[in-house]
Image (cartoon, rainbow, N blue to C red):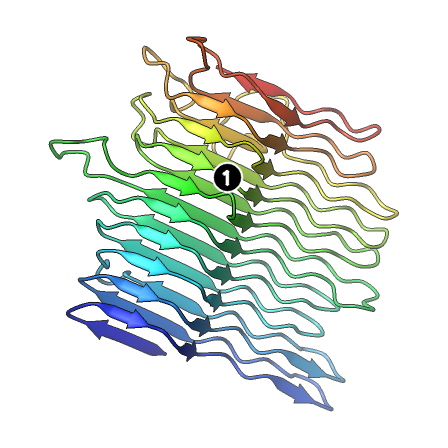
């Protein structure tokens, strides 16, 4: 473990390495070393410009029982939130290691800033390790601007994908996609309640929680979850956010699509801020394709309403706590493209729901460019707005 504490500003412009070691044997039972832990806590700003390498080690052997190491864990502000956090121009890796029998699980990045916001412009990775047998699932990324407010700005890339089958694999399952969570809060009992906490993803941003590719008769990995949440602030999304099912390279089934969920009314009073998918931006929770098997379904249901954890849905934009009420919620404007397609062949399209206000004083949001059709015999997804 590496721990950095200070009473004043912390600035790092160098490499920090806490990797797990590689393992190799001509016998059986090689296990890659797990990545370590990096913890940074401080009452004042933290600025990181270098490289944090906490990847799990790889494992190879001629026998069985082989697993790549698990990705490491990065904690910034978890014990005592930092006032603000800036991660710039660097690579921050906590991937799982590759393993012949099983890939390592992706690690985690956990960031909390107390009031000065978070700026993310580097490359953040917590992907699962590849394998010739069972690929590792993606890890977790969590960035939170805590209760005193502050804005969260993303200009870099976040990758929590599942691991994919290694080249030449006879049969290998794809790893499931991980979770990417972004939140910006405010002090709900303060004199200016509801005025803080926005999330902005710039056109250069990339968030990937895709399932991994499979080989042979094995199933590809399901897509993960991308979740953005604020109580009453605005969310502006450029760039690309994906939670797609993995690709089946053989006769296996394509991966199920995941969930992209954006909510600006987390305090449930139907006065959420605006949600805007900017021109050129992409949200994609499609099912994965298959070379000679069935395509994966995107999330869909016979019940056309969102119920967290109970009713599947591919993409949800919510500015009025779904149910609404006397308030119409914040404006929802889709100027980009939303995908929730069924995988080829015969995958079912996914459901897309917008809950909030539409433009020009309309009660229901307009769909914009939504592509949630099924393939072949797979049915189409539905669009719901209120």
Q: Residue 105 falls in which quadrant of the image?
A: bottom right
Q: Quadrant of the N terminus?
A: bottom left
Q: Residue 65 falls in which quadrant of the image?
A: bottom right
Give coordinates of residue 98: x percent, y percent: 65, 72
In the picture shown, does residue 296 fall above or below 215?
above
Disc 1: CA contacts within 10 A as few (<14), some (14-19) or many (>=20): many
Give coordinates of residue 260: x percent, y percent: 53, 38
Residue at 53%, 44% in the rendered image: 225
Which residue was labeled with disc 1?
A: 238
Q: Residue furthest bottom?
A: 26
Q: Which type of secondary structure does the marked residue at label 1 adopt?
A: loop
In the picture shown, does residue 179 fall above or below 131?
above
Give coordinates of residue 344: x percent, y percent: 80, 39
Q: Is residue 272 left or right of residue 135?
A: left
Give coordinates of residue 77: x percent, y percent: 27, 61
Q: Is residue 147 left or right of residue 14?
A: left
Query: Residue 384 or 101: which is nearer the viewer?
Result: 384
In the picture shown, does residue 331 fall above or below 34?
above
In the picture shown, does residue 364 fall above or below 16?
above
Query: Residue 207 or 360: which is nearer the viewer?
Result: 360
- State how many labels appear: 1
Q: Residue furthest right?
A: 292
Residue at 70%, 72% in the rendered image: 101
Q: Is residue 385 left or right of residue 342?
A: left
Residue at 73%, 44% in the rendered image: 288
Query: Residue 275 or 138: which is nearer the viewer?
Result: 275
């Amino acid at each position: 473990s590496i721990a950095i504490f200070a009473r004043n500003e912390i600035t790092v412009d160098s490499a920090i390495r806490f990797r797990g070691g590689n393992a190799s044997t001509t016998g059986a039972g090689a296990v890659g070393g797990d990545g370590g832990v990096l913890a940074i806590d401080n009452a004042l700003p933290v600025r990181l410009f270098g490289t944090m390498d906490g990847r799990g080690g790889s494992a190879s052997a001629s026998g069985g029982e082989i697993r790549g190491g698990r990705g490491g864990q990065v904690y910034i502000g978890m014990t005592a939130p930092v006032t603000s956090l800036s991660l710039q121009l660097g690579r921050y890796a906590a991937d799982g290691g590759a393993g012949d029998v099983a890939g390592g699980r992706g690690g985690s990045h956990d960031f909390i800033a107390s009031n000065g916001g978070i700026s993310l412009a580097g490359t953040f990775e917590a992907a699962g390790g590849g394998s010739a047998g069972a690929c590792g699932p993606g890890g977790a990324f969590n960035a939170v601007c805590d209760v005193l407010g502050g804005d969260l700005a993303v200009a870099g890339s976040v990758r929590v994908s599942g691991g994919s089958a290694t080249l030449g694999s006879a049969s290998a399952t794809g790893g499931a996609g991980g979770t990417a969570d972004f939140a910006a809060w405010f002090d709900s009992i303060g004199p200016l309640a509801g005025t803080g906490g926005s999330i902005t993803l710039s056109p250069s941003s990339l968030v990937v929680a895709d399932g991994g590719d499979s080989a042979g008769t094995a199933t590809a990995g399901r897509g993960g979850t991308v979740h953005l949440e604020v109580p009453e602030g605005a969310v502006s999304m450029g760039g690309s956010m994906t939670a797609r099912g993995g690709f089946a390279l053989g006769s296996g089934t394509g991966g199920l699509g995941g969930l992209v969920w954006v909510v600006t009314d987390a305090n449930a009073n139907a006065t959420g801020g605006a949600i805007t998918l900017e021109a050129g931006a992409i949200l994609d929770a499609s099912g994965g394709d298959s070379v000679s098997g069935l395509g994966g379904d995107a999330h869909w249901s016979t019940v056309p309403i969102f119920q967290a954890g109970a009713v599947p849905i591919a993409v949800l934009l919510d500015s009025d706590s779904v149910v609404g009420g006397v308030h119409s919620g914040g404006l929802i404007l889709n100027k980009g493209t939303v995908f929730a397609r069924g995988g080829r062949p015969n995958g079912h399209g996914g459901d897309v729901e917008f809950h909030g206000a539409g433009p020009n004083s309309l009660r229901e949001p307009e769909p914009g460019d939504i592509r949630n059709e099924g393939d072949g015999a797979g049915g189409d997804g539905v669009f719901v707005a209120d």
